[in-house]
Image (spheres, coloured by chain):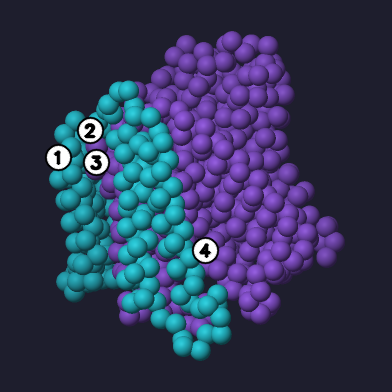
Amino acid sequence: MEDRSIQIQLGIGAIAASVFLIAIAIPFWVSSPSNVPNIILSPLFWPNVLSALTGLVGAGLILTSLARPRPEHPAKLDVDDRPAAFRRLAIMAVIMTATVLVMPRLGLVWTAMVTFVATAFLVKTKHPKAAVVCAVLIPLVLYVFFAHIAGVAIPQGDFVRLP
Amino acid sequence: MSFIDSLLAGLQLVGNVEAFLALGLGVAIGVIGGAIPGMSATMAVALTLPFTFSMSPITGILLLLGVYKGGIFGGSIPAILIKTPGTPASSATVLDGYPMAEKGQAGKALGMALWASCTADLISNLALIFFAGFLASFALSFGPPEFFTLILFSLTIIAGVSGDSLLRGALSAMLGLLLATIGLDLVYGTNRFTFGNPNMMGGLNFIAVLIGLFAIPEILSMVWNPSSHDGVARSLGKNKVTFQEYRRSFKSIVRGSFIGVFLGSIPGIGAAPSAFLSYSEARRKSPNKENFGNGEIEGVAASEAGNNGVAGATLIPLLALGVPGDVITAIIMGAFMIHGLQPGPMMFVLNVDVIYGLFIGLIVSSVFLFFLGSVAIRGFKYVADIPRGVLFPAVLILCVYGVFAVNNNIFDVGVMFAMGGVGFVMMRYKVPAAPFLIAFILGPLLEDNFRQSMLMSGSSGWVLFRGPITWFFWTLTAITVFAIVRAGIRATRQPSVPTP
């Protein structure tokens, strides 16, 4: 992507975020006591100021991008197969979401092993055996450190409990 | 407490095997982390942070400082051997380091990088020791208005210099400041963007945001393009750096070290600009200037001195003013707070033993860096051969454990993944992450000092201009904004460059 279109997209995004914050998010999700003596001291003041500044920065991004001359050469793509790259990203998002959702039931150690293997195969590791061995060993070593040395209560899950 | 008393108190705190072991281990982790392309010193420090929770404050912080120092040097190894800087600070080292490696002089280039790094590191540490206390005693007279103007100045400079576009840096800082408003209001205790979720009432966890912004995007980049980070390592060759060559480059090393100290002590500038400035100054002053870019050993020395000269100096604003000098010191600031210490001028009064313990540890770290760096140069082949398809899933698991361990809270792991997504989008859109993180840390301080100033003055804005210190920071802020806007206008007039 060229700098010019990045700036325009960022500018539009920043203005949209600013409008959303001022019109919806702040009135609905920021509460303020009714007896605040001065607007400057209100809990609403700072978020409103920052939102307005975000909008201004967005406007600045659009204006400066329009002032830029167009590039002479088109941008090169960073990956050959973009749909496949987006597919991998979507699968990674599923892995991450599943990690958070499954962890209380399965336990951190077993979830970490599954996540490790899934990620390694997603990035097409050239060393699948090493990946599987590491997927078992690394979560166990980390469990020993955090649970038995650092005293962290690592979630054990409902199925197999570790000592 | 006299200087000798303070020194002895510090020595008492760090004069044990555990502290020096942590420091040495930290340097080793840092060198390895910095040497792995795609890892970076920042990520190495962030991933080490959760392991310090069970340690005493001084041991934990020494471990992190070791990782920081080692990481900055470690980045030069892949920069020279595979033309891929392990950390952004080593970008200038590629210019002459890789051409030297192509000529079969990689061993010489790495040797010079190590000598220059250790020399600059020592100079930077001494600068920290001499200036931090002086600055802290000056900062003791700061009230909320002075701190507000100081933090505002820091944010201006951070937003302006941490990327190729001021506005993108400013956008990043705004997003960080907005994210910092999540949680209970500082004065009235009312909800701000908490959505009734008790996990959000204390604000988002700093470690989750940090690791999410700096480690997860690298993993997502690997998922996006699994063939990235591949490189062919050059052999070390038979040549070693000689004392003659070190002496010939000594002026450039010292000059680069002072450039690093100066730029490092200004919050937000960081190591990469310092390395490039040191390199260009060395080229300007060198009789072999035409050889720069083609494998000039003085170029390697200057860039490494420039980036390592920053390492100690970035701790000056952190320790003396409580303002992080760069992203890594922002993480170290988080470590201080996790261990119940608040960096800033009062630390020189309340925790002087910790301060002097750190000073002693930092001086020793230069020695560790020299010996461990020599080993790392020879062992890089093994580090470079770690398969990325195994390394990055391991980093992911380390992130999950580390973030969970902060509060024993799965919600934080979710925050980390969400911030990872944000960080990846920012990376794709070339929005620098550093202003985001530093603004996220400084945001509550900025707001708190602003509101305290208003409470003090009965909501009169004039309190923010109440004395010479506030005027000094307002002037600096105005000069910085003017300089950055001017540079931005010049950049806008140049043709846009297509990027991948």
Q: Circle 1: is it few (<14), some (14-19), or many (20+) Cα within 10 Å? A: few
Specify the quadrant that holds the N terminus of chain B. bottom right
Find disc 2 in the rendering and name its residue: A79
**For mark 4, does the 10 Å Cα neighbourhood hold few (<14), some (14 to 19), or many (20 or more) residues?**
many
Proximity of marks 2 and 1: CB atoms separated by less than 8 Å: yes
Residue contact between numbered discs 1 and 4, judged by CB atoms under 8 Å: no
Which residue is rendered at x = 34% and y = 27% of the image? A71
User: For this rendering, which residue is in front, B169 or B101?
Assistant: B169
Q: Residue at x 75, y 50 (%)?
A: B131
* Disc 3 chain ID: B
Q: Amino acid at mark 2?
A: Val
Q: Residue A87 vs residue B133: left or right?
A: left
* Residue that carries the numbered disc 3 in the rendered image: B224
| Relative depth, front residue between B308 and B440 | B440
Cα separation between marks 2 and 4: 37 Å
Palette colour of chain A: cyan
Q: Amino acid at mark 3?
A: Trp
Which residue is labeled 4 in the image?
Answer: B443
- Residue at label 1? A84
Q: Residue furthest bottom?
A: A35
Q: Are marks 3 and 2 in contact (CB under 8 Å)?
A: yes
| Residue type of the residue flagged with mark 1 | Ala
The mark lying in front, picked from 2 and 4, is 4
Q: CA distance from mark 1 to mark 3?
A: 9 Å
Q: Secondary structure at mark 2?
A: loop
**Chain letter of the purple region:** B
**Residue A30, x across and y down, in percent:** 39, 77
Q: CA distance from mark 3 to mark 2?
A: 8 Å
